Image: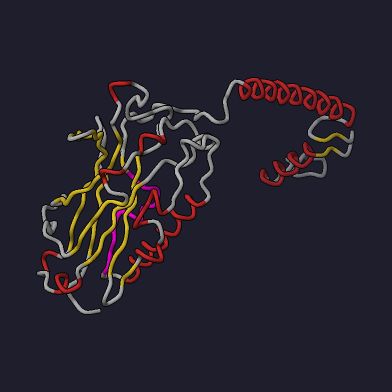
Amino acid sequence: SSGINAEWPLRPGNKVAVAFSDFFRFLYNPDDHTVMGRGGESWGKIILFYFFFYSALAGFFAICLYVMLTTLDPNVPTVTGRTNRPVLAISNGDLYTMNFKDDKAWKSYTSAVEDVMSKYSANTAESTDKKFTWDATTMTGCADNNTFVKNSDTEKSGCFFMGLNRMYNWQPFDASATENAGKHLSIKCALDIGRAGNGNMEPPFDFEMQPSFDTQELEKHYPWTSMKESGLQPVVGLKITMKIEEMKNTDDGKLNSYLKCLPYIRSAGSEEQLPSSRAIDLTVKFTNKDD
């Protein structure tokens, strides 16, 4: 049985090597010169087909997009009604706190003031009667940061800024209606005990609206329709002026004060909060230690 004519079984090859060999042969078969089972002519046909197929899809998509864009007004917000409540706010988060006792925080505040002022200095609007201009008339004592930003041993002062959020085609009231004659939109602030209930209600500083509450007429900048037509919304300032000696005599537990500001509709002899409006909360921090 072990003679010269006996048949010996073939030894099976390595399965991994065989698999790789078959895969590479699929990628390119040198016997019939095909790539992934297709010859040059077949690949040419399929590439040409998909070129025209996807070109047609891209063209169809471009036409649909163009038609859709022609129905949109570039000066009208795409989404409106996301909020229907007037909210007092300011665009820079570093302008919600005025910290006289921390150099880093004060630097952030001064940078934020410069940022807001630069935005309003570049404010443009096609409707000049609704455009808000940042100047000595509209911002009075908070118009020039060279005069109100102070944090030295002898002088400490600063300004908060606030305005209503932009809502498309919104106005506080119909100013053209006869019954609304003499009404004005104004903003004012008052001391607040704060969320933790530890706010100093007799702080060592004076605070004053800039311009004063009785002279504000913000309604003339509404209704707001777009940045192109109306520009940035109107803002007012709140100037804080520290009383240095009183500040030094303040107890350690009363070194923070809070202010809450709200918009009002005022008329001769009366005022009422703007319906559904939300306040802006501001913080003033100071120290009783010598710098």
Percent across and percent down for residue 267 are 23, 33
In the displayed structure, 256 sits above or below 71; it is below
Give the quarter of the figure containing the C terminus.
bottom left
- Residue drawn at the location 28% of the way across and 31% of the way down: 183
Percent across and percent down for residue 155 are 28, 72
Q: Nearer the viewer, residue 244 or 137?
A: 137
Residue occupying the far bottom of the picture: 290
Please tell me in which quadrant of the rendered image residue 184 appears. top left
Q: Tell whether 81 sits left or right of 11.
A: left
In the displayed structure, 133 sits above or below 152; it is above
Q: Nearer the viewer, residue 9 or 48?
A: 48
Q: Tell whether 73 sits left or right of 170.
A: right
In the displayed structure, 77 sits above or below 30; it is above
Give the quarter of the figure containing the N terminus.
top right
Q: Which residues are magenta?
A: 89-100
Percent across and percent down for residue 218 are 35, 38
Q: Tell whether 94 sits left or right of 22.
A: left
Q: Say if the magenta span includes residue 66.
A: no
- Residue drawn at the location 60% of the way across and 20% of the way down: 71
Give the color scheme: rainbow, by chain, secondary structure or one colour.
Answer: secondary structure
Percent across and percent down for residue 125 are 53, 39
Please tell me in which quadrant of the rendered image residue 108 appears. bottom left
In the displayed structure, 215 sits above or below 100; it is above
